[in-house]
Amino acid sequence: IIQGVLVHPDYRGNRLMTKIVDEWLDQSAKNKRMHVMAEVSIDNHFSWQVFLNEGLHIHSIGTDPADGTVVYNI
């Protein structure tokens, strides 16, 4: 499970989120973990698009019980 990925504003636009997701997927595979999951606010277009570009898909939509944010389960 990946959560809380943040990129400092000064470094945005350098594809760091893509690198983080790629490393997460690589480490998961190396550890024989073939199922991964991420939760992303539906308003965070950039983040969920990175996951889709890296081969994941939106599984469902829900509400985070902690704060009521509507999220995609990826």
Image (cartoon, rainbow, N blue to C red):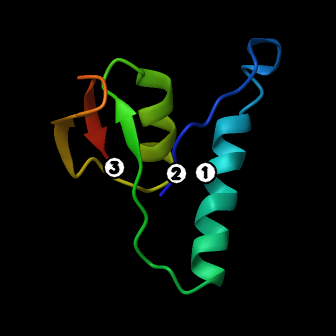
Residue 63 located left or right of residue 45: left
> Could you say where residue 25 lies in the image, as x and y percent from the top left?
58, 64
Residue at the limit of the structure toward the front, as seen here: 66
CB atoms of marks 3 and 1 within 8 Å: no
At mark 1, the secondary structure is: helix
Q: Which residue is mark 1?
A: 21
Q: Secondary structure at mark 3?
A: loop
Identify the element where label 2 is drawn: loop
What amino acid type should be assigned to the residue bearing mark 1?
Val
Residue at point 49% right, 31% down? 47
Tag on residue 74? Answer: 3
Q: Residue at x 65, y 56 (%)?
A: 22
Q: CA distance from mark 1 to mark 2?
A: 9 Å
**Which circle's residue, 1 or 2, is located before the other in the chain?**
2
Residue receiving disc 2: 2
- Residue type at tag 3: Ile
* Label 3 neighbour load within 10 Å: few <14, some 14-19, many 20+: some
Mark earlier in primary sequence (3, 1): 1
Please tell me which of labels 2 and 3 falls first in the chain: 2
Q: Residue furthest top?
A: 10
Could you give the CA–CA distance between mark 3 and mark 1, rounded to whole angstroms? 12 Å
